[in-house]
Image (spheres, helix red, strand yellow):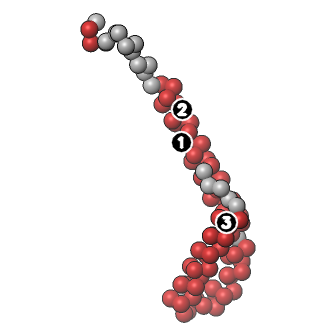
Amino acid sequence: MMKCDVKTMLKAALGLAVAIAVAYATFPAAREWLTASAPFLFFLICPLMMFFMMKGMHSCDKDQRAGKTQADQAPSTPSVGHSPLKD
């Protein structure tokens, strides 16, 4: 499960800053658009992180449910003195 705290938010902001810097250096034609949209993209970090965190929680919940269902349906082990092959 993803924990969304200040450290995670700072990592995401740093990743976005690196991505914007690389795009700025790589695509000179898009520099004006990047400069104009960068503040808005940083503003979107919080809702995007919340979205991905919630998606992660749902996938973990599905995995746990699937594991519980498999554990419930697993055949019980025979007792030590009893072998199913001798019957």
Marks 2 and 3 sit apart, C-alpha to C-alpha, by: 32 Å
Farthest residue, direction top: 87
Residue at horizontal 34 percent and vertical 9 percent from the top: 82
Q: Secondary structure at mark 3?
A: helix
- Residue situated in front as seen by the camera: 43 or 10: 10
| Amino acid type of the residue tagged 1 in the rendering | Asp
- Residue situated in front as seen by the camera: 10 or 28: 10
Q: Is residue 72 left or right of residue 87?
A: right
Front label number (2 vs 3): 3
Residue under label 1, please give it: 63
The location of residue 46, given as percent across then percent down, is 71, 66
Tell me the crowding category of disc 3: few under 14, some 14 to 19, or many 20 or more residues within 10 angstroms, Cα based.
few
Q: Work out whether residue 36 can be spotted.
A: yes
Q: Is residue 67 left or right of residue 61?
A: left
Residue under label 3, please give it: 7
Residue at horizontal 27 percent and vertical 12 percent from the top: 85
- Residue situated in front as seen by the camera: 69 or 85: 85
| Amino acid type of the residue tagged 3 in the rendering | Lys
Marks 1 and 2 sit apart, C-alpha to C-alpha, by: 9 Å
Tell me the crowding category of disc 2: few under 14, some 14 to 19, or many 20 or more residues within 10 angstroms, Cα based.
few
Residue under label 2, please give it: 68
The location of residue 87, given as percent across then percent down, is 28, 6
Earlier residue among tags 1 and 2:
1
Q: Is residue 78 left or right of residue 72?
A: left
| Amino acid type of the residue tagged 2 in the rendering | Lys
Earlier residue among tags 2 and 3:
3
Asked if the residue at tag 3 contacts the one at tag 1, i.e. Cβ–Cβ closer than 8 Å, the answer is no
